Image: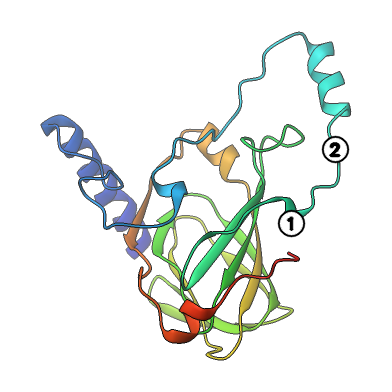
């Protein structure tokens, strides 16, 4: 029930803010200072498909099928970094899926948030746990983790000496296309880190 109240409350709050001219929940006037550009920068969530059918098919067939992750820069820090690899803004080979890599520095954790789409996390390295609607789930390298629809969740690294790496796959663009738009950051990750986190750099070969 908690997740549905979360979305319902968010919808009511958003509509009330729009009616009274109040800045939105992720706007500069309302949020804490963050280092993640995805919370402040304009993004393309779903591309327009324009042209003839033949032109679109030829364009699709000419797209690369291999995308080296090392071509992308890490964003974020100091406890949580990420890089988006496949999404409608960065590539034209896919329109309905989004894939990105998340890295947690020693003892790091991400934002507490909720969104309408589900997501699959595959743990490549490390140990940690998630909290989904107040319930804890432990994970380790080799595990696949499901974040279900409208779940309020947060990811934590339990390794205080080494990094954790996860691969995230989700159909978020498809949900947004269907106007399942509602999401919210309930708690931002800390901007200040521990000594180990401040000394950490994400892997250069990933």
Q: Position of residue 129 (x, y in %)?
A: 52, 81
Q: Which residue occupies the foreground of this view, 15 or 161?
A: 161
* Relative vertical location of residue 90 with respect to residue 5 in this rendering, above or below: above
Q: Are marks 1 and 2 in contact (CB under 8 Å)?
A: no
Residue 205 versus residue 135 in the image, above or below = above
Q: Nearer the viewer, residue 167 or 14?
A: 167
- Residue 46: image location, x then y, percent: 58, 31
Res. 1 in view = no
Q: Residue at x 83, y 32 (%)?
A: 63
Crowdedness near tag 2: few (<14), some (14–19) or many (≥20) residues, C-alpha within 10 Å: few
Query: Residue 50, located in which quarter of the rendered image?
Result: top right
- Seen from the viewer's position, the closer of residues 34 and 65 is 34
Instruction: Say whether residue 80 is visible.
Output: yes
Mark linked to residue 87: none
Residue 82 x %, y %: 57, 60
Question: Where the C terminus falls, by quadrant?
Answer: bottom right
With 185 as the anchor, is 54 left or right in this view? right
Q: Is residue 7 left or right of residue 180?
A: left
Residue neighbourhood size for the residue with mark 1, other residues' Cα within 10 Å, grouped as few (<14), some (14–19), many (≥20): few
**Tag 1's secondary structure?**
helix
| Circle 1 residue | 70
Q: State the residue lying farthest toward the top.
A: 52
């Amino acid at each position: 029930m908690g997740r549905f109240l979360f979305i319902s409350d968010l919808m009511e709050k958003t509509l009330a803010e729009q009616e009274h001219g109040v800045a939105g929940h992720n706007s500069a006037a309302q949020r804490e200072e963050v280092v993640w550009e995805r919370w402040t920068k304009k993004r393309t969530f779903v591309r327009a498909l324009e042209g003839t059918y033949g032109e679109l098919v030829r364009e699709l067939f000419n797209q690369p099928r291999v995308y080296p992750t090392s071509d992308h820069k890490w964003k974020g820090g100091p406890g949580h970094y990420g890089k988006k690899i496949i999404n409608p803004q960065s590539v034209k080979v896919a329109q309905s899926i989004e894939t990105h890599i998340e890295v947690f520095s020693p003892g790091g954790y991400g934002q507490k948030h909720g969104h309408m789409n589900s997501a699959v996390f595959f743990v490549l390295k490390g140990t940690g746990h998630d909290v989904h609607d107040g319930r804890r789930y432990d994970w380790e390298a080799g595990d696949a983790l499901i974040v279900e629809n409208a779940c309020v969740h947060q990811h934590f690294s339990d390794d205080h000496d080494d990094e954790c790496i996860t691969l995230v796959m989700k159909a978020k663009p498809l949900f947004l296309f269907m106007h399942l738009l509602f999401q919210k950051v309930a708690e931002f990750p800390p901007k200040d880190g521990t000594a180990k986190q401040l000394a950490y750099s994400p892997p250069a070969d990933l």
